[in-house]
Amino acid sequence: MAREKTTLNLTSGSWITRVFVGAFIVFMAIFILGPLFWLAARAFATSWTFPNLLPDGVTFKWWGTIVGDKSLLDAIRNSLIISPIVVLVSAFFCIPAAYAFSRYNFFGRKTFLIGIFAANAFPTIGLYAAIATLYYTLNLMGTVLGIIIIQLLGTIIFMTWIPAAAFSSVPRNLEDAARDAGASKLRVFRDITLRLAMPGILVAFVMSFLASFDEATGTYLVGAPEIYTMPTKMYALVLNYPVQIAAVFSILLAIPSVILITVARKHIIGGHLAEGFQIK
């Protein structure tokens, strides 16, 4: 009898657990996918009047409006040009620094790493306001160079911390064995260190691109009204365009993020992103 009661309690507990897990999955699906479905419905709706549960009609007119609006196309072009440049410049400076943080135990190493993290841990609007004062002096307001510098501030943490952890995860005995076999330092770095660290570096590239592509506050402060990117153009869309146009533009803004996260998902899920924020 006691064994039957124990079995019954376990079965009841498993049933309750499954219910809670199922409810949580449904909640997360609605929380994540719900806004996307709402945007998709708005992007193809002629209008949607309350209290109707469905749109009043379906149309592709709003997508054509995006194509025919030069200011919106310019914003898309600016984002697709500026963000890759920011990522490449960030990689050029930060990846060598990440390798140094990983391989050399110099004075102030952890202080520099924590400083990089701390610079991104506080509201940045005050920093942007101070930078704007300097930009006026250097005539960088309303320039592509000024926007690139602003967006670099948001990519440094990803392009330094994550590759540093990736380089640290490469066993040094493999490098030593290759050198003992006669391989040069450059070949060891290219064929062993860089190859094994590449998944973490790929995650850093993805996160840096997303940080640059989605940056709005500093870009708007520095670039407007001469230069708009997709996130900064959303301000004008919300105020001056039909809600359907904003829905279409939001979908276009989300497409690069979805594609990159999908491509790098196995490395992100594999722990390279989490490992990048551990100081060793």
Image (tube, rainbow, N blue to C red):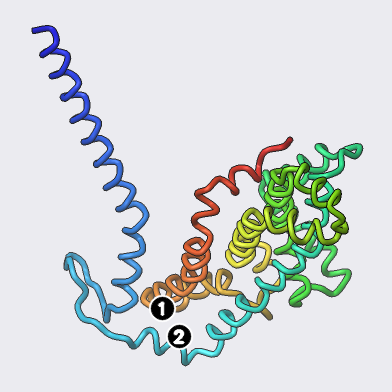
105 with respect to 28 (left or right): right
Report the quarter where the N terminus lies: top left
Counting from the top left corner in percent of width and height, residue 117 is at: 72, 44
Q: Which residue is mark 2?
A: 66
In which image quadrant can residue 101 be found? Answer: top right
Tell me which label, 1 or 2, sits earlier in the chain: 2
Say which element carries label 2.
Answer: helix
Looking at the image, the residue that sits furthest to the bottom is 68
The structure residue drawn at horizontal position 50% and vertical position 55%, both measured from the top left corner, is 266
Q: Mark 1 touching mark 2, by CB under 8 A?
A: yes
Task: Tell me the residue that label 1 is attached to.
Answer: 245
Residue 22, x across and y down, in percent: 24, 41
Task: Look at the image and tell me in which quarter the C terminus lies.
Answer: top right
Q: Nearer the viewer, residue 63 or 189?
A: 189
Q: Using the image, tell me which numbered label, if any, was put on residue 227.
A: none
Question: Is 2 in front, or is 226?
Answer: 2
The x, y position of residue 132, in whole percent, is: 78, 64
